[in-house]
Amino acid sequence: MNFRRNGFTLVELLVVIGIIATLIAILLPTLNKARDSARRTVCASNLRQFGIAAHGYASENHGYFPPSSPDILTTNLQRWIGSRPTASSPFDVAGSPMRGYLGDGQVRRCPVFEVTVAGFEAASGGYGYNGSHFGSTMGVDGFTLRAARTPAKASSILRATQKVLFADTAMAAASAGGTNVFEYCFTEPPRAYGGGATSPSIHFRHRKQANICWADGHVTAEAMAWTYPGTNVYGADNARMNLGFVGPIDNAAFSRK
């Protein structure tokens, strides 16, 4: 008598499961890389839009880039990303000087940026503007009302292909519960006015790279060139939090000249 076997034996089922598990193990890193690459492309597109918006603003405002924080020394309610009713509120893009140049008028969030606390620059989406040299002259002239209200002219930027305009940014702070990451809307140069060290804010979150929008509008993914050893002003470890700089150990990649 012939018996027809239906289904798999236990051994055959285990072999199939083993093959599937092996294929997943082989393919998963590739799939993760493809996903990360797609997210980095979306982020680069967001930064490119900021670059276009900044140049669009300049073309209609006597060649001047958008002001980064014109009232930072007074009411502290305005940024390039928008305005807020109180100094502890999130920014609303409706008050941004670039709103009319941002396509749908929105500030988009980097798709891989995970915020652990609200911070004091909420709603910037994980992006920062070169505020001390392009959005003002505070990086050169110090913290004065005039400097805060005087952005750069696009025509004054030398070697624009090598100057940071916008970038992936964040700030980190240590607390009793661990280190928190939050939004920060400025790309800090290595040296503040007077020569003191700053807390790095370029965030190398795309597999140890950061997207940079340069002053001519093109966008590239850059690895961290260097960072300050130890902790920032908020007690967070710069290297561990992937916060650092592009360019040399001076302000060459951030200054106008």
Image (spheres, rainbow, N blue to C red):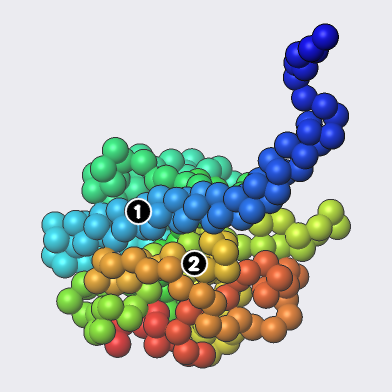
For the residue pair 106 and 209, the one nearer the viewer reads as 209
Mark 2, secondary structure of its residue: strand
Q: Nearer the viewer, residue 206 or 162?
A: 206
- Packing grade of label 2 (10 A; few <14, some 14-19, many >=20) is many
What is the quadrant of the C terminus in the image? bottom left
Quick check: can you spot residue 103?
yes
Q: Residue furthest front?
A: 1
Q: Secondary structure at mark 1?
A: helix
Residue 6 x/y as whole percent: 75, 16
Q: Amino acid at mark 2?
A: Ala
Residue 17 vs residue 174, the one in the foreground: 17
Q: Give percent across and percent down for residue 167.
A: 43, 65
Q: Amino acid at mark 1?
A: Ser
According to the image, label 2 marks what residue?
A: 210
The residue where tag 1 is placed is: 45
In this picture, residue 242 sits left or right of residue 16 = left
Which residue lies at the image location 21% right of the left edge and 67% below the top edge? 64
Numbered circles on residues, count:
2
**Quarter of the view holding residue 135:** bottom left
Position of residue 155 in the picture relative to residue 45 (left or right): left
* Quadrant hosting residue 4: top right
Q: Is residue 14 left or right of residue 129?
A: right
